[in-house]
Image (spheres, grey):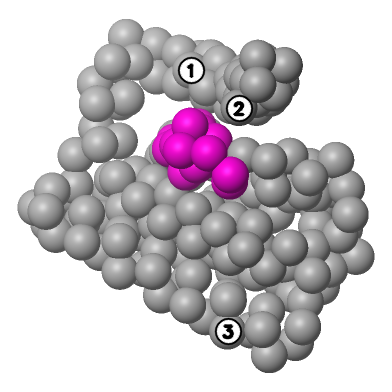
Amino acid sequence: MSNRNNWQHWKLLIQILLGLTPFLVIGLLLVALFKGGAFRPFLLSLFVPDQLSYVSVAILGLIVGFSIVVVTVSLVKWTNTELPESESTEMIHHMMKTPSGIAVSSLGGSFFEEFFFRGVLIGLFIGYSQLADWAVILISTFLFWVIHVPQYKGVSLALVSVFLNGLLFALLFYVTGSIIPSILAHAVYNVGIGIYFMKAK
């Protein structure tokens, strides 16, 4: 990789991380606002499963992630779906060509988004009633879907997939009480689908 390409690659990774940072900052501000003195315990609780072991939730997250990749890739092949030509999809193609890009996509994207959409938006507002919990889960899933619409605009399968994935990630958090399985499932999905589209290009 030439110096110019190397610099462009690192510039791209920094741009992506900066784009993800607001999820962390806004999430932390919301936790501070709603939890006050219980700020630190709440944050720590997001990583502690309610009843299952850490190994169990990790395996659950990996299984769900691999399952989503298999189903999504199968549907993409069956329907001959292609990602739209856009700046964000071009960015994904460039990222998935290097180990550092794959790491940012899988770990950065999954951690920041799961922390905000599942850990904060769901974690802060559940526990009042089952009906309220479902409303919170659906609102969080909808907001997760909305931020991905520009990236997949015009590709119905991708838009449906993002909503269903967001719902599965939300249910993983809701059922286990930990964002660990949703982070892992999201990471596996990002890597799997990213590599598939990179090779298909």
Name the residue carrying label 2. 1
User: For the residue labelled by badge 3, is the local secondary structure a helix, a strand or a loop?
Assistant: helix
Q: Is residue 58 above or below residue 5?
A: below
Label 3 is placed on what type of residue? Ser
Which label's residue is closer to the chain start, 1 or 3? 1
Q: Which dot, 2 or 1, sits closer to the camera?
A: 2
- Please provide the residue range marked out in magenta: 96-114
The reply to whether residue 174 is in sight is: no
Could you tell me how far apart the alpha carbons at marks 1 and 3 are, in whole angstroms?
38 Å
Name the residue carrying label 3. 74
Q: Is residue 37 above or below residue 57?
A: above
Could you tell me how far apart the alpha carbons at marks 2 and 1 are, in whole angstroms?
38 Å
Classify residue 199 by image quadrant: bottom right
Residue positioned 89% across, 54% down in the render: 85
Residue 109 is inside the magenta segment: yes
Name the residue carrying label 1. 28
Label 2: how many Cα within 10 Å (few below 14, some 14–19, many 20+): few
Residue 39 percent coordinates (x, y): 34, 15
Residue 146 is inside the magenta segment: no
User: For the residue labelled by badge 2, is the local secondary structure a helix, a strand or a loop?
Assistant: loop
Q: Is residue 46 left or right of residue 93?
A: left
Label 2 is placed on what type of residue? Met
Q: Is residue 13 left or right of residue 131?
A: right
Residue positioned 80% across, 57% down in the render: 152
Residue positioned 21% across, 56% down in the render: 57
The reply to whether residue 57 is in sight is: yes
